[in-house]
Amino acid sequence: MKEIAPDVWQVGGGFPPNGINLYVIGDVLVDAATRHGGRRIFREIKGREINAHALTHAHPDHQGASHEVCERLGIPYWVPERDADAAENPKLIGERQPDHPIAQFFARTMTGPGHPVDRKLRGGDAVAGFEVIDVPGHSAGHVAYWRESDGVLILGDVLNNIDVLTGIPGLREPKSFLTPDPAENRRSAKSLGPLEPKVVLFGHGAPLRDTRKFVDFVSGLED
Ligand SMILES: [Zn+2]
């Protein structure tokens, strides 16, 4: 694992690098890749104390290994309130995705088992020194995690810093065919500009330490 900011670690070992990201903040694992990601996760977090598992959103490439992680570590599952039903009953994940062949293919091949949710996260909640921010659109309950003291923003899939199909790096909105409500997601992205984050951590793509680039990108999105 690589320390990105104090007590914020990017879990490595994925291929391609930065393709599907997860993070450890304090003693909390944020996201859990696809259902094939368990071995990578356990290899990377070996020797670390993890006391809870939280999601940015309940999509197949973020909740895939969540059940395995919570079971094996015996830790609670913290999920954004309006994604909690899908985290427990993953049939809803595919149903809520756009009716597009790629979205449905990802849902079939990556979605992990459901797992009981122990804590429903709401905007304003605290998780390992971060504040939960509601940023719905890419999923019904999508949240980001924000640490104002040093400007670290864990953004999930509100924006991607890589093209998830071609692997070409660069800041962009998530694919519309993987996003149930692109207009709402765009409003959520724009709402984050005033934070002026110093480090942005994505579900897909490398960390971004260029505040201006982030702020200009979101303020340039049309209403
Ligand atoms: Zn994703």
Image: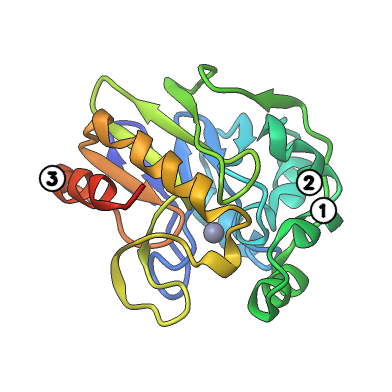
**Residue at figure coordinates x 76%, y 45% from the top left:** 87
Q: Which mark is residue 86?
A: 2
16 to the left or right of 180: left
Answer yes or no: do the residues labelled 2 and 1 have beta carbons within 8 Å? yes
Q: Is residue 48 above or below residue 146?
A: below
Cβ of mark 1 under 8 A from ligand 1 = no
Q: Is residue 151 above or below residue 175?
A: above
Element marked by disc 3: helix
Identify which amino acid the numbered label 1 is placed on.
Leu
Element marked by disc 1: helix
Q: CA distance from mark 2 to mark 1?
A: 5 Å
154 to the left or right of 85: left
Identify which amino acid the numbered label 2 is placed on.
Ala
Q: CA distance from mark 3 to mark 1?
A: 37 Å
Q: Which residue is mark 1?
A: 92
Q: Which mark is residue 209?
A: none
Identify which amino acid the numbered label 3 is placed on.
Arg
* First in sequence: mark 3 vs mark 2: 2
Q: Which residue is mark 3?
A: 212
Q: CA distance from mark 3 to mark 2?
A: 35 Å
Task: Please identify the residue farthest to the front as the structure is shown.
Answer: 223
Q: Position of residue 105 (x, y in %)?
A: 71, 77
